[in-house]
Amino acid sequence: MDRLAIISAESARLADVLSGVDPDSRCPTCPDWSAADLLWHLINVHLFWARIIELQIRDEKDLVMVEESKPSRPRSIGDMLVLRAQATDDLVGQLAQHDDADPCWSWWPSDQTVGFTRRMQTYEATMHRVDAELTASLPVSPMGDDVAAGAVDQAVDVMWGWMPDGASYRGDATVEFLATDTRQRWLVEVGRWTAPSDDEGAVVGGPRAVRASAAEPSATVEGRATDLALWTWTRGGSVRVSGEPSSVAALNSVVARGMP
């Protein structure tokens, strides 16, 4: 997979689509954002991670200088489009200078490498391109099978795995994802994390999922690899979910939590 080519192409497609829509159009998959907000978000993301890599940030306390170096949001879409191209070029240029194993801060504690950023930005650019097409009421362009499978991997192994420090986790069910076109298979354990709250005796919690190594699934999700990717990232996707009602409910809680 040529991740840098994907990041460049998907970001350019997003910009091309958004250049032709009303900046105030709402993004259906990110309802708090307008089309202009979506464009600015991608710019911010690319500027942020390019600077993280350039400055070789390895500690969260040093993020303040990254944030302080960001430009103000341009007033016009035309100026934002110019800045988007520059920001994407900066990110791709920084990624091109480093190996995946090079150390670099990330928000995912178990992977503090440039490789994490390279993978994450592949799928983020792809999914935000989907957001742009949906905002413009255009058909969703295809993604490669390798990108789709990687997006599902990222959902299962990273995006659904967060829980706060000090929390405990309980698995409730195992679900099988099956790509009907590529025959790829994922076993996913879904459950909940719980943790003490600030109020004495109170407990807070939320849905969580992790990769399952071996277990008999009690629910199944079937669809093309691209549809599984879109579905896991809450961007649509035509899938068929079946199985025990309690297992399906546990899975739905994880998916309903949404994606950034």
Image (tube, rainbow, N blue to C red):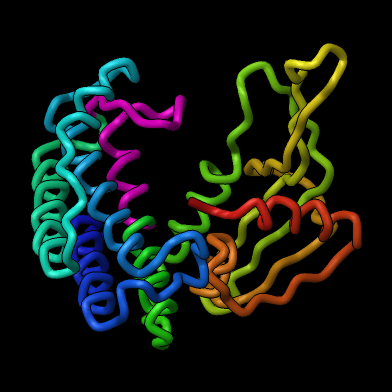
Depth order, front residue of 213/162 = 162
Depth order, front residue of 168/203 = 203
Position of residue 251 relative to residue 55, above or below, is below
Q: Position of residue 169 (x, y in %)?
A: 75, 29
- At x 30% / y 81%, what residue is drawn? 21
- At x 54% / y 43%, what residue is drawn? 157
User: For residue 2, what is the image quadrant?
Assistant: bottom left
Residue 226 forms part of the magenta stretch? no
Depth order, front residue of 36/159 = 36
User: For residue 37, what is the image quadrant?
Assistant: bottom left
Residue lying at the far top in this picture: please name it.
200
228 sits to left or right of 254: left
96 sits to left or right of 227: left
Residue lying at the far right in this picture: please name it.
245
169 sits to left or right of 11: right
Which stretch did the figure color magenta?
102-123
Position of residue 94 relative to residue 218, above or below, is above
